[in-house]
Each structure stands twice: as structure tokens, then as C-alpha cells.
Amino acid sequence: MRTSILLALASLLGAISAQQTVYLIRHGEKPADDGDGLSAQGLERAQCLRNVFGASSGYNIDYIIAEQPKSSGKRTRPLMTVQPLADDLGLTVDTSCDRDKPKCVTKLVSKYDKHGSGNILICWEHDALTDIAEALGDDDAPTYPDDSFNFIWTDPSPYSDVTSETSEMCPGLDS
């Protein structure tokens, strides 16, 4: 009897620990002329995220998704924002989804849910973050502010609700 209870508890704990959380962030700051890539502040934010989401953080990031860059050099900001973190974690950033294809992101998350063990970080253009949260199942997804680059949206499995919005708290960038 005692062995049965212990096995049931172990099974339950395994199922609970398999529940991933999706974290959604905006790419780093862009140049004042709206050119390609990141500004100096955006590059600084990319470095800061190495600490915010790094191996010693509580985020346990094991999969990173960023929107697909264009061959012209456009839409590179999300990848540039998370690449230093991915390098630190030994991960390859999945850039297989176009910016305007939130259902593609949903498919990646669903596929990862079947075999992944860590959490998921999604970095995208801010207007499309709401679309991604909605495609994941949030019927009342927040709107990412135009003038902010520091918010982390937390969307735990089953991804039906962004449960918190916190700051990355990057020194010199966020107050």
C-alpha cells in the first residue's frame, strides 16, 4: 500500500514538473532612425537578458523562439536580442516562424510540450505578442505598450492566461 502511494505521488510530481511556462518578451531597443538591428541600449538589453534568464535564474529556459529574420536584414531584432542568452545556454534559437504567423508559434510550443522539460522564451515584435498569446489560448491577452521594451509576460501551461507582467529590471535601462 505504502509503495503504491509513493509511486502515485512520484507520478503526480513528474506530471506537475512537466508543465512548461511560456515567457514572452519584446526585442531590445531599436535605433532612433528605425534602421535594422538594435541600438546601443538594445545591445545592452541583450547582454542583460543573459543574467535575467540565464542558467542561474529561476526561469529554467530550455527552448527559445524568435521571429524569422528576413534575408534583407529586416526583422533581426528578436534574434539579436536572445542570441547571447542562447549561446550561454547552449541552445539554438528556433526562427522557423514568420512574424505574422502566430499559429506557427503555437505549433512549436505544442510540439515542445510533448518532449521538452524546461520553459520556453519567445522574443517577438511587440504588436505580434498579443496575437501569439491569443493563439496560445488567452482570450483576454494584454497589449504590449509601444514605448516599453522591458516587460516579461508569464503564461503557464495550458497557456490560457498571461498571469503576470514583470520587468526585466536591466540596470541602466529599466526603472
Image: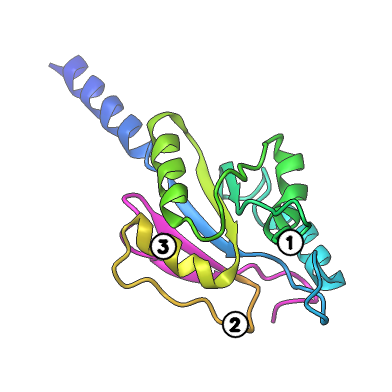
Instruction: Give the label, 2 or 1, closer to the camera.
Output: 1
* Proximity of marks 3 and 1: CB atoms separated by less than 8 Å: no
Residue 174 magenta: yes
The residue identified by callout 2 is 146
Colour pattern of the rendering: rainbow
Q: Which residue is at 55% across, 81% downward? A: 145
The amino acid type, in three-letter code, at marker 1 is Lys
Q: Nearer the viewer, residue 60 or 71?
A: 71
The amino acid type, in three-letter code, at marker 2 is Asp
The residue identified by callout 3 is 133
Which label's residue is closer to the chain start, 3 or 1?
1
Q: Is residue 36 left or right of residue 120?
A: right
Magenta residues span 152-175
Q: Secondary structure at mark 2?
A: loop
Q: Compared to 98, does 55 lie above or below? A: above
- In the image as oriented, which residue stretches furthest toward the right? 40
Q: How many marks?
A: 3
Q: Nearer the viewer, residue 158 or 36?
A: 36
Dot 2 crowding, Cα within 10 Å, few <14, some 14–19, many 20+: few
Residue 92 magenta: no
Instruction: Give the label, 3 or 1, closer to the camera.
Output: 1
Q: Secondary structure at mark 1?
A: loop
The residue identified by callout 1 is 74
